[in-house]
Amino acid sequence: MRYFVARGETDRLGPDTRAGRRGDFAVLSDGTTHYELAGPASGPVFVFVPGLTIPLDFWDEVTTVLHGRGSRTLTYSAYGRGYSDRVRGRYGRPLFVRQLDDLIRRLGLSDVHVVGSSMGALISLAYAASPGSRAASLTVSGPAGLSAERNPIALLPDPLTPLVGKHLLRRNLLAHLDRNVESTVDAERLRTVVLDGFRFEGSMHALTSTLTHVPFTNQDALFDAAGLPPTMLVWGANDRVTPATAFDRAVELLKPVRAEHIPDCGHMAPFERPQRFADLLTTFVTELQT
């Protein structure tokens, strides 16, 4: 797909726009990744894998709780999001799995507890089952992949895809963000977190390419428990993006050690119920270590 710059992309990523940002930047196989490794150095390490739109600060409330409990956390922005590079290649699952693997290896981490939400759950599943994975456990929250209904962009003829991405996708993105969470307060917080990074050139191209090239449906094979470390499944009971009607199917495939519904919660449990989500992570990992 041809690279394009969409309306609203008023800035270009570079040293000036990255100057003074929290965290660090690593030059990996496919480009520069914005990441933050924080918390007590001796604790268990949680690696948070982002979904379709979210940058590293999406996880702030969860990581703050975990740091207070002695855990270390790695958060990062996927290529095309936040302050990570906009690449000109295909934004398919291999790109995102490679980014995750590159970053874990670059930082010399091992026996990490991988946590993925929505599309990030699919990236996490693929990474955790891959040769050389350093995942000691896996948590998937509101995972995509179990629906049979394809997204409309993936159904477009090739010549129309960049046109739709350039002219229509930003409006659809705003509506999508509002559907992710239950409350208007959380919706406004989410917009603030996500949209800062979408002012950079190439962001809508990245999102369009992701929707085109990452398979979001009929991914049952990814959920095969045989190739995975101990796993926990978490789902917001009121999820409208990846409805919890797929919960039982996910349990059947993943055979998780723990399977949890979070009541009064939408698609983004780590963002909407950070204390509860941190409690689940802490309990899960503690039980694995005893």
Image: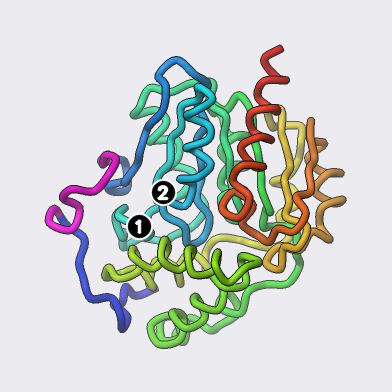
Q: CA distance from mark 2 to mark 1?
A: 7 Å
> Toward the viewer: 96 or 70?
70
Find out whether residue 254 is within the magenta segment: no
What is the crowding at mark 2: few (fewer than 14 residues within 10 Å), some, or many (at least 20)? many
Question: Does 6 sit above or below residue 51?
Answer: below
Q: Residue at x 41, y 61 (%)?
A: 193
The residue that label 1 is drawn on is 82
Cβ–Cβ under 8 Å for marks 2 and 1: yes
The residue that label 2 is drawn on is 56
Q: Secondary structure at mark 1?
A: loop
Name the amino acid, label 2: Leu
Question: Does 244 sit above or below residue 179?
Answer: above
Name the amino acid, label 1: Gly
Q: Residue at x 70, y 28 (%)?
A: 284
* Residue 234 percent across, percent down from the top left: 72, 45
Labels in figure, total? 2
Q: Which residues are magenta?
A: 15-27
